[in-house]
């Protein structure tokens, strides 16, 4: 996610049943768009469109793999941990907590070890 999401964008995404189903399906395992379409009972184009939106918003992480034949394929994993919506005098404040990237988690572990 390159910029802060606006509350209407977050609300619109979470209002979409397909997007919510994708987030739930990818919470515990990485799935391809084909697997998501089967698991969430949606067409592949629908799954691909929702995946693109979720990746663009930083709610879903995309991983690229190369199979032994040299073909590329993608798998997706939810990055979303929690969304907090606060009503303030000037409007809504939306805080999105993401799951840290595994590489970042390893780096932070090594940094903590060095400090000790």
Image (spheres, rainbow, N blue to C red):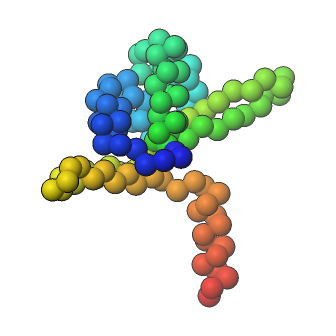
Q: Residue at x 52, y 56 (%)?
A: 100
Q: Is residue 112 above or below residue 62?
A: below
**The residue positioned farthest toward the bottom in the image shown:** 116
Q: Is residue 93 left or right of residue 67?
A: left
Q: Is residue 14 left or right of residue 50?
A: left
Query: Residue 72, image x and y in percent?
Result: 74, 26
Q: Is residue 14 visible?
A: no
**The residue positioned farthest toward the left in the image shown:** 89
Q: Residue at x 57, y 54 (%)?
A: 101
Query: Residue 50, image x and y in percent?
Result: 46, 25
Q: Residue at x 69, y 35 (%)?
A: 64
Query: Residue 59, image x and y in percent?
Result: 46, 41
Query: Residue 25, image x and y in percent?
Result: 43, 33
**The residue positioned farthest toward the front in the image shown:** 90
Q: Total label count? A: 0
Q: Is residue 39 left or right of residue 87?
A: right
Q: Is residue 106 above or below residue 9?
A: below
Q: Quadrant of residue 113?
A: bottom right
**The residue positioned farthest toward the right in the image shown:** 69
User: Quadrant of the image for the C terminus?
Assistant: bottom right
Q: Is residue 18 visible?
A: yes
Q: Residue at x 39, y 36 (%)?
A: 24
- The residue nearer to you, when weighing 20 against 24, is 20
């Amino acid at each position: 996610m390159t910029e802060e999401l606006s509350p209407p964008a977050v609300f619109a995404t979470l209002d979409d049943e397909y997007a919510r189903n994708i987030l739930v399906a990818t919470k515990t395992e990485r799935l391809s768009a084909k697997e998501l379409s089967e698991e969430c009972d949606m067409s592949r184009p629908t799954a691909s469109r929702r995946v693109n939106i979720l990746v663009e918003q930083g709610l879903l992480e995309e991983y690229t793999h190369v199979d032994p034949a040299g073909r590329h394929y993608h798998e997706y994993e939810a990055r979303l941990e929690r969304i907090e919506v606060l009503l303030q005098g000037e409007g809504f404040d939306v805080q999105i907590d993401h799951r840290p990237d595994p590489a970042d988690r390893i780096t932070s572990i090594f940094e903590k070890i060095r400090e000790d």
